[in-house]
Image (cartoon, grey):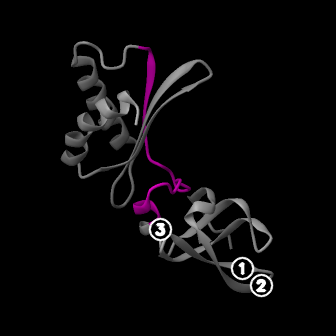
Amino acid sequence: MSKVIETVTPLLKPILEKYDFYLYDIEFVSESGSWYLRVYIDKTGGITIEDCALVSDELSEKLDSIEPDPIPQAYYLEVSSPGAERPLKKDSDFQSAIGDYVNVSLYAPIKGNKVFEGTLKDIKNDTLFIEYNDKSVMRTVEIPKSSIAKARLAIKFD
């Protein structure tokens, strides 16, 4: 974990608790020569633009009040929802996605496929059980977490 994330996370906690929000993810990254502090928040029922603005304003005020500046380089603060197709990274992300439609990309093929999209049915012993449609036949694939390159929620189009 970066020093910036270690500094920002405890500053965020009381802000998020005050509004019954939770921290989904936080990252401090350099892109195209600029630094970005990205804070992804959520709440039951979903986060709004107003919620993001509230957290952004309060966090910005807290960060500006600290001496010496905990983030000495110039950066952009972005507070947002993780989105409808949010990434699944932590064990808790996968657990909360049981029953949801997911997209999983693999490092190496399983059953000839490197991408599976379907309903996450269960997780046992670090293995995901995904029910997917294979040429109009519903099948279940077992995917070890160690084989996953990327995973996210997906939107199902019928």
Q: Which residues are magenta?
A: 73-94
Q: Secondary structure at mark 1?
A: strand
Tags 1 and 2 in contact by the CB under 8 Å rule?
yes
Q: Name which residue lies at 47% across and 49% down.
A: 82
Who is closer to the viewer here, 117 or 112?
Answer: 112
Q: Describe residue 99's horizontal placement relative to residue 26 as left or right.
A: right
Q: Which residue is mark 1?
A: 133
Crowding near the residue tagged with mark 3, few <14, some 14–19, many ≥20 C-alpha atoms within 10 Å: some
For badge 3, the amino acid type reads Ala
Tags 1 and 3 in contact by the CB under 8 Å rule?
no
Q: Secondary structure at mark 2?
A: loop
Q: In the rendered structure, does residue 143 fall within the stretch colored magenta?
A: no
For badge 1, the amino acid type reads Asn
Who is closer to the viewer here, 59 or 32?
Answer: 32
Q: Name which residue lies at 56% across and 56% down.
A: 85
Location of residue 128 with respect to 9 vertically, above or below: below
Q: Which residue is mark 2?
A: 136
Q: In the rendered structure, does residue 92 fall within the stretch colored magenta?
A: yes
